[in-house]
Image: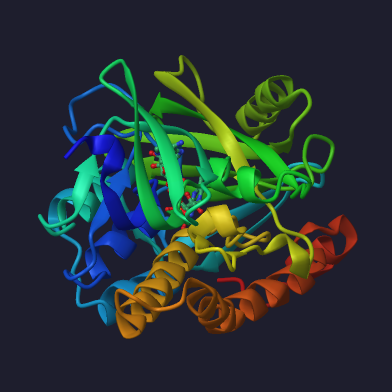
Amino acid sequence: MDANDAVYDIAVVGLGPAGATLCRLLDPRFRVIAFDRKASDPAAPGFRKPCGGLLAEDAQLALSRQGLALPNEVLADPQLFSVRTIDLCRKLERTYRRFYINMDRHKFDLWLKSLIPAGVEVHHDASVRAFSREADSLWRIRYFENGEEKSVRARTIAGADGAASLVRKTLFPKHKIRSYTAVQQWFKDEQAAPLYACFFDERLTDCYGWAVSKDGELVFGAAFPRENASRAYELLRERAGQFGFVLKDPLRTEACQVLRPERARDFRVGTPEGAFLLGEAAGFISPSSLEGMSYALDSAEKLAAIFNAGGKDCDVASLFGQYRAGTRKIRLKLLTKILKNPFMYNPQLRTLVMKSGITAI
Ligand SMILES: Cc1cc2nc3c(=O)[nH]c(=O)nc-3n(C[C@H](O)[C@H](O)[C@H](O)COP(=O)(O)OP(=O)(O)OC[C@H]3O[C@@H](n4cnc5c(N)ncnc54)[C@H](O)[C@@H]3O)c2cc1C
């Protein structure tokens, strides 16, 4: 059969934590095709998700629920149990207890991809360029692979393509969600002791910055409103330097978009025509901590369970309704994070909390 004529039950766009988890948990009776810009070989050049690589407790819980244990090679050295929180404007510092797992994010992504069953047709190093709904209600997905433009058809499409999601933008071209530019650089780790720190400086950003020691290197980054992000990053680096952090001669620089939802309608889970959004593509990321992996794992698990229960011939509109209802808890949880935001990001409130020493070590 010509590849253009093949019809799949589900086409998954993007194999970060959300897409890889969905593919792993889908019942083998579905005919699934998946596309990911990343290469499968860890040494190969190509797309790597810029990330702090910290696995929060809720993400640890999701992995446990899904019966997974993290292999050693995914862990980064050292494991840290507290975060130094620094307000660079007021020169205030406090240390708080945290229970993150420190990981190599790229290795984590490749490990999750390696768990996808052989029955799923995975296209690594392949980029989806466009998709549209045809007269027979099937989705036509156009992708670019090995220098060639190709296409397939599928009954449903699952957009797990992250913050800059093509699937989300195609389904909701008019909807704008608040987004920031995350910039981070890697340095040889020359701090006095291994470090996990976060930085606030409202002169440069109303979001925050981070520094994490990883395998002899230090990643230092921050999320900025989209204009002048690189200038703001340089100033933040300079100010952190004045605070005693050693940040010279960057080894590499990364940047990408990160979403920061601010209202209920920023969460979009798809359309009744059989298009689904999961992970950050759905807007599922904490606007306070920018933690997104737990929501990627949770939403993928939910969508897989709904597909599996519905079976191959289930009405796609009904699947969509179930997924929308099934992700209500995720949306509510994120709404509470939106409400919590002022306590972290309002300078006066944050100063009060930090000065009070509540919950600090
Ligand atoms: C700088 C930074 C630091 C962060 N730190 C943390 C952290 O420490 N802990 C945490 O929990 N969260 C963190 N986050 C958030 C977290 O990285 C995301 O929320 C999470 O990765 C979302 O997972 P996902 O699977 O939905 O999307 P992604 O991880 O973004 O995966 C999407 C995948 O889709 C693929 N893709 C995209 N477009 C296409 C296309 N057109 N065709 C084919 N493939 C495509 C890409 O290969 C990509 O791997 C951070 C985010 C940023 C930007």
State how many labels appear. 0
Where residue 113 appears, as percent x and y from the top left, is 23, 50
Would residue 182 be seen by someone viewing this image from the given angle? yes
Q: Residue furthest left?
A: 118
Residue, x 65% and y 49% (percent of image)? 259
Q: Is the residue 161 above or below the residue 217 in the image?
A: below
Where residue 322 appears, as percent x and y from the top left, is 52, 82
Q: Is the residue 262 above or below the residue 76 in the image?
A: below
Where residue 136 appears, as percent x and y from the top left, is 47, 54
Name the quarter where the C terminus is drawn: bottom right
Q: Is the residue 71 above or below the residue 225 in the image?
A: below
Residue, x 25% and y 19% (percent of image)? 146
Please give left or right for residue 295 compared with residue 270 in the image.
left
The image quadrant of residue 61 is: bottom left
In front of the other: 300 or 219? 300
Q: Residue furthest right?
A: 348
Where residue 157 appears, as percent x and y from the top left, is 44, 55
Please give left or right for residue 205 compared with residue 59 in the image.
right
The image quadrant of residue 118 is: bottom left
